[in-house]
Image (tube, rainbow, N blue to C red):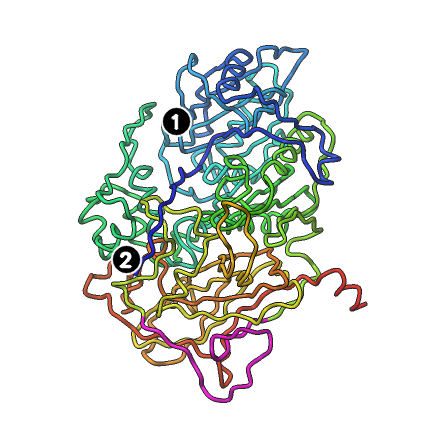
C-alpha cells in the first residue's frame, strides 16, 4: 500500500545566481565578517533587475580556447569601471545557457545575492564547450587530461585557464583578480577550473560540486542507479546540439501520468526506456546503459584524483539534505585538502537541499524544522570570502570546517573534518527489533527476514510527482516501517544526547533466495511519543525523521569494477560507505535503523536475478526473493558510526 499526500515539486537548481534577501549574521562568525548585511525591505526581484539594468553594461564575447574553439561568454561590467576604478571578475561556467542572449537583454540576477551587484564585480557567464552558443563537442563530466601533449588536449581546466587568461588581458578595467563559483554542474566546472590554477584565480567556491557520477553523485549511489533523476534530467538535457544555438527547443518530457512511481513501474525494465520513449536519441542515456559497472569509462570521469596544483583559496559548500550531490562536496574538500597542503581550504555544510543556501531560507525541510533561517547565516560569509580575496576586504572568520549540527540545530566550527576527537562505535542489530552499542552474545545464527517483491517496491517518498523529490531526505518514515518488507530496529530511549559526526559504514551479513539484491540502510531519529505542538502545527510525537539513507547493490560487494552474483542461501558480507552526518539524537529520543531492498523510483529496481548488464534485464528476469539479515554467531550486522563526545564527557575523561 502506498500512502499518498499532496506535495510541491521543486525545480532543480543547477546553475545561475538565485537571489535571496539577507539578514545580519546572528553568530560569532558574523562579528568578524567584512560586510554587515541588513535587509532592505524595498529590495524586490523587480528592483534588483532594474538596479542591474541601470548600473551595468552587458557585452558578449567569443573567447578562443587553445584549440581554436570559441567559447561564448556574457560579461556585465559596472558602468563606473575605469582605469581608476577597477573591478575583479566573478566567473560562472555552465552547461545550462547564459541566457538571455543579446546585449540588450539582461539577467535579473548576477551574483548569489543582491549584495554582489551593489558591491560591484565584473560578472562573466560562459557556455561551456559544446553547449548552447559555444563551439566544440560537449562531453558530460569531461575527463581531465593530466599531461597535455599539445593544443588539442583540452579539458575543463584548460578551457577555464584560457578563458581567464583572455579576460584578464582583454576586459578593460579589471583588477587582475578572478573568482569562480557555481552550483551542481557549474560546481564541477569550478572544481575543474581550480586545477592547475591560473595565477589570476584567487578564490573558487565549488558548491554542491559533482565529483563522481558512479560512486555517489546524481546518477548512482554505490553503483545503484538513480533512475528518476537520470531519466528526468537527460530526457531534456541529453538531446544533441549539433551547432551553436541560442534557442531552447526542449518542450519537456510528456510523462502521461502525474506519478513517477506509477510511470516507472509501468515502464518495467530499464531496457524499455529506449524502446518506449527515447528511441536511442539520447546519446548519454545510451552510454549509461552500456556501462553498468565502474569501468574505465566512469573512472575517467572521476575528478577527485586530479584536484591538484590548486593555488586559489577554496570554499566548498554543500547541504546535508542534498538529494543530488552530497558526496561531491565532502569528497572534493577531502581531495583538495590531501593534494594541496597549505592552501586556504574550507568546508561549509548546512541543513540545505541542493543549492538551498541560495534558493531557500534553509529553515525547514520535509518534516524537519531547524528553528531559524540558516541560509542567512551563510550568505554574508560567502560574500565576505569573495570580497576578501578579490577586493582586499577583511578576512572572514571562517574555520577549517563550518558545519551545521542537525538535531541540535546549531552551527559548529572544527579544525578538521571529520572532527579529530570522534570515537568509532557500532550500532548492532539485535533480536526483537532492538538496536544497541553492545555486541550481541547470541551464539545461534539468528536472523530477520523479509520478502522483496519488485512488483511492489518500497517507495522512497509519499509525495506524488514526476520530478525527483528534494524533501524525502527529512521525511517521516512511518509509512515505510509499517511495511513487511522493511526491517526496523531501534534503541531504548536515550538518557543523554548522542552526536554522530563523520562518515558511516554499513556492515551487513545477508543472504537471498535469488542471485542479486539491493540493500538500503536508513538512519532515523525517533521523537518521543508525546510532544507539545504549537497551534496549527502537526503533532510530531513518535515521528521517525530520516537523517541519512544509502543504497548498495550487492553485486558490487567485492568490487565496483567486477560485479558477481550472490549464491542463493549463502551468507555474504556486504560493506559500504554512507555519506557523513552531523546529527545529535537528543535525550528522550531513540536511534532507529531501517533496512529494505527497494527505494523506488529514486533507485531502479533490482531484478534479484543476476544479469550481467543489469540495465538490460528483461521484464521476465524480475523475481520475488527472500532476504535475510544475520545478527548472531559472529555474523553481526551493524552500522559503524563516529561519535563526538559531549564537552562534559571529554572533561570527565581527562
For marks 1 and 2, give the CA distance.
33 Å
- Taking the spot 50% from the left edge, 29% from the top edge, the residue there is 17
Q: Residue furthest bottom?
A: 443
State the image coordinates of residue 239 (x, y, percent, origin top left).
Answer: 28, 37
Q: Is residue 433 magenta?
A: yes
State the image coordinates of residue 314 (x, y, percent, origin top left).
Answer: 62, 40
10 Å crowding of disc 2: few (<14), some (14-19), many (20+): many
> Picture quarter containing residue 123?
top right
Q: Nearer the viewer, mark 1 or mark 2?
A: 2
10 Å crowding of disc 1: few (<14), some (14-19), many (20+): many
388 or 622, which is in the foreground?
Answer: 622
> Picture quarter containing residue 22?
top right
The answer to whether residue 30 is left or right of residue 289 is right
170 or 190, which is in the foreground?
Answer: 190
Q: Which residue is mark 1?
A: 134
State the image coordinates of residue 345 (x, y, percent, origin top left).
Answer: 65, 44
Q: Which residue is mark 2?
A: 615
Dot 1 or dot 2, earlier in sequence: 1
What is the tally of numbered marks visible in this picture? 2
Q: What quarter of the picture does the N terminus occupy?
A: bottom left
Q: What quarter of the picture does the C terminus occupy?
A: bottom right
Amino acid at each position: 500500500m502506498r500512502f499518498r499526500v499532496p506535495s510541491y515539486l521543486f525545480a532543480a537548481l543547477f546553475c545561475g545566481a538565485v537571489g535571496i534577501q539577507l539578514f545580519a549574521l546572528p553568530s560569532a562568525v558574523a562579528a568578524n565578517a567584512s560586510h554587515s548585511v541588513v535587509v532592505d525591505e524595498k529590495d524586490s526581484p523587480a528592483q534588483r533587475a532594474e538596479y542591474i539594468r541601470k548600473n551595468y553594461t552587458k557585452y558578449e564575447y567569443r573567447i578562443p580556447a587553445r584549440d581554436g574553439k570559441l567559447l561564448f561568454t556574457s560579461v556585465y561590467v559596472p558602468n563606473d569601471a575605469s582605469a581608476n576604478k577597477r573591478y575583479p571578475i566573478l566567473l560562472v561556467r555552465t552547461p545550462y545557457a547564459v541566457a538571455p542572449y543579446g546585449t540588450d537583454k539582461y539577467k535579473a540576477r548576477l551574483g548569489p545575492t543582491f549584495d554582489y551587484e551593489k558591491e560591484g564585480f565584473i560578472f562573466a557567464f560562459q557556455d561551456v564547450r559544446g553547449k548552447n552558443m559555444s563551439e566544440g563537442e560537449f562531453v558530460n563530466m569531461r575527463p581531465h587530461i593530466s599531461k597535455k601533449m599539445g593544443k588539442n588536449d583540452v579539458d575543463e581546466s584548460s578551457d577555464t585557464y584560457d578563458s581567464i587568461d583572455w579576460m584578464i588581458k582583454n576586459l578593460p578595467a579589471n583588477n587582475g583578480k578572478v573568482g569562480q563559483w557555481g552550483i551542481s554542474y557549474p560546481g564541477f566546472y569550478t572544481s575543474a577550473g581550480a586545477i592547475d590554477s591560473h595565477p589570476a584565480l584567487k578564490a573558487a567556491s565549488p558548491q554542491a560540486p559533482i565529483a563522481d557520477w558512479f560512486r555517489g553523485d546524481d546518477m548512482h549511489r554505490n553503483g545503484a542507479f538513480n533512475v528518476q533523476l537520470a531519466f528526468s534530467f537527460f530526457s531534456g538535457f541529453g538531446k544533441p546540439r549539433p551547432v551553436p544555438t541560442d534557442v531552447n527547443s526542449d518542450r519537456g518530457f510528456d510523462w502521461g501520468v502525474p506519478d513517477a512511481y506509477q510511470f516507472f513501474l509501468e515502464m518495467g525494465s530499464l531496457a524499455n526506456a529506449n524502446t518506449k520513449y527515447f528511441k536511442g536519441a539520447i546519446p548519454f542515456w545510451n552510454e549509461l546503459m552500456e556501462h553498468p559497472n565502474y569501468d574505465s569509462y566512469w573512472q575517467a570521469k572521476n575528478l577527485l584524483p586530479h584536484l591538484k596544483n590548486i593555488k586559489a583559496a577554496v570554499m566548498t559548500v554543500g547541504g546535508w539534505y542534498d538529494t543530488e550531490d552530497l558526496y561531491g562536496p565532502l569528497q572534493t574538500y577531502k581531495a583538495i585538502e590531501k593534494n594541496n597542503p597549505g592552501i586556504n581550504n574550507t568546508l561549509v555544510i548546512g541543513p540545505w537541499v541542493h543549492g538551498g543556501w541560495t534558493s531557500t531560507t534553509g529553515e525547514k525541510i520535509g518534516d524537519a524544522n531547524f528553528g531559524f533561517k540558516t541560509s542567512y547565516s551563510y550568505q554574508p560569509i560567502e560574500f565576505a570570502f569573495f570580497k576578501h580575496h578579490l577586493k582586499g576586504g577583511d578576512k572572514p572568520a571562517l574555520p577549517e570546517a563550518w558545519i551545521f549540527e542537525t538535531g541540535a540545530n546549531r552551527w559548529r566550527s572544527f579544525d578538521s573534518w571529520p572532527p579529530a576527537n570522534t570515537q568509532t562505535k557500532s550500532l548492532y542489530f539485535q533480536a526483537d527489533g532492538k538496536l544497541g552499542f553492545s555486541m550481541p552474545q547470541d551464539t545461534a545464527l539468528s536472523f530477520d527476514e523479509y520478502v522483496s517483491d519488485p512488483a511492489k517496491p518500497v517507495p522512497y517518498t509519499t509525495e506524488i510527482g514526476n520530478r525527483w523529490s528534494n524533501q524525502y531526505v527529512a521525511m517521516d518514515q512511518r509509512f515505510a516501517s509499517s511495511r513487511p518488507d522493511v526491517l526496523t530496529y531501534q534503541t531504548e530511549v536515550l538518557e543523554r544526547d548522542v552526536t554522530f559526526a563523520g562518515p558511516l559504514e554499513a556492515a551487513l551479513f545477508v543472504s537471498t533466495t535469488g542471485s542479486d539484491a539491493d540493500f538500503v540502510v536508513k538512519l532515523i531519529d525517533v521523537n518521543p511519543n508525546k510532544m507539545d505542538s504549537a497551534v496549527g502545527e502537526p503533532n510530531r510525537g513518535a515521528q521517525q525523521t530520516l537523517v541519512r539513507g544509502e543504497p548498495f547493490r550487492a553485486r558490487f560487494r567485492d568490487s565496483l569494477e567486477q560485479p558477481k552474483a550472490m549464491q542463493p542461501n549463502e551468507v555474504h558480507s556486504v560493506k559500504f560507505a554512507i555519506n557523513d552526518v552531523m546529527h545529535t539524537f537528543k535525550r528522550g529520543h531513540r536511534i532507529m535503523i531501517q533496512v529494505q531492498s527497494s527505494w523506488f523510483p529514486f533507485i531502479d529496481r533490482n531484478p534479484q536475478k543476476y544479469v550481467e548488464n543489469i540495465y538490460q534485464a528483461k521484464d521476465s528476469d524480475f523475481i520475488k526473493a527472500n532476504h535475510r539479515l544475520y545478527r548472531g554467531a559472529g555474523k553481526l550486522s551493524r552500522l559503524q558510526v563516529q561519535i563526538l563526545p559531549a564537552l562534559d564527557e571529554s572533561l570527565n575523561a581527562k
